[in-house]
Image: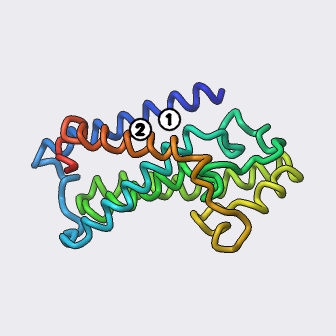
Amino acid sequence: YRGLFSLLSFALLAWLVFGFHDMRQNPFDPLNEMMWVPPAWLRTPAYVLIVFGFIVGVAGLLTKNPTAAFFENALNDAEPARGILRITRHPFLWGVALWALAHLMMNGERFAVMLFGALGAMALYGSRSIDRKRAALNPEGWARFAAVTSSIPFAAIIQGRNTVRLGEMWQRLLAGAAVFVIIGFAHRWLIGVPAF
């Protein structure tokens, strides 16, 4: 079931991305109407959020995580919160949320607001839903994991419940930066608008 769900989720996301591309190519599509006009000064903070979102999200995909499908048993590991999980226990979902927020900051078309708003809301709601499910599945393991992690990035570190250890994650962070560059250069082909 999970494999099929993941495959269908990826297919739906691809359909949305290519639908967004096709919609942008048609200036007469009513979904191209502007709901708001983003000011130029928002581009710089939006790019910072996109870069951070990509790096955190990709690092999260490459890290064994008890909040990810098929890795629930990682709650029983001696140290389940390693690498990027020290920063947030939902790195992929926060990566998606930051990416979506940044795109909302730069795109005011009706379809963009619907697409990025929905993806951002899904990511934030998903993290809360996963927390509840994991806590119910393994209360003791979850309590130990939650005690040293936070959903909100850097909250556990600021509260002194964990520390950043770059040695545990630098390769995954570099992989995230590399994916950002690759997607950035492919953005014109994927979406029809250059990213750089």
Q: Is residue 49 visible?
A: yes
Q: Which mark is residue 13?
A: 2
Q: Amino acid at mark 1?
A: Ser
For residue 160, side relative to residue 94 (left or right): right
Residue 9: numbered disc = 1
Q: Can you give x and y, in whole percent of width and height, for residue 78 in the image? A: 83, 45
Q: Which of 60 and 40 lies nearest the eye of the viewer?
A: 60
For badge 2, the amino acid type reads Leu
Q: Quadrant of the N terminus?
A: top right
- Circle 1 — which element? helix
Front-lying residue, 111 or 123:
123
- Tag 2: Cα neighbours inside 10 Å, few (<14), some, or many (≥20)? some
Residue 29 percent location from the top left of the image: 16, 48
Q: Residue at x 68, y 49 (%)?
A: 82
Q: Are marks 2 and 1 in contact (CB under 8 Å)?
A: yes
- Residue lying farthest to the right in this orientation: 140
Question: Badge 1: how crowded within 10 Å, few (<14), some, or many (20+)?
Answer: few
Q: Is residue 164 left or right of residue 39?
A: right
Residue at 36% in and 51% down: 115
Separation of disc 2 and disc 1 at Cα?
6 Å
Tell me: residue 25, above or below residue 111: above
Q: How is the image coloured?
A: rainbow
**Residue at the spot x=75%, y=47% of the render?**
80
Residue 114, image x, y percentages: 35, 55
Which residue is most to the front?
167
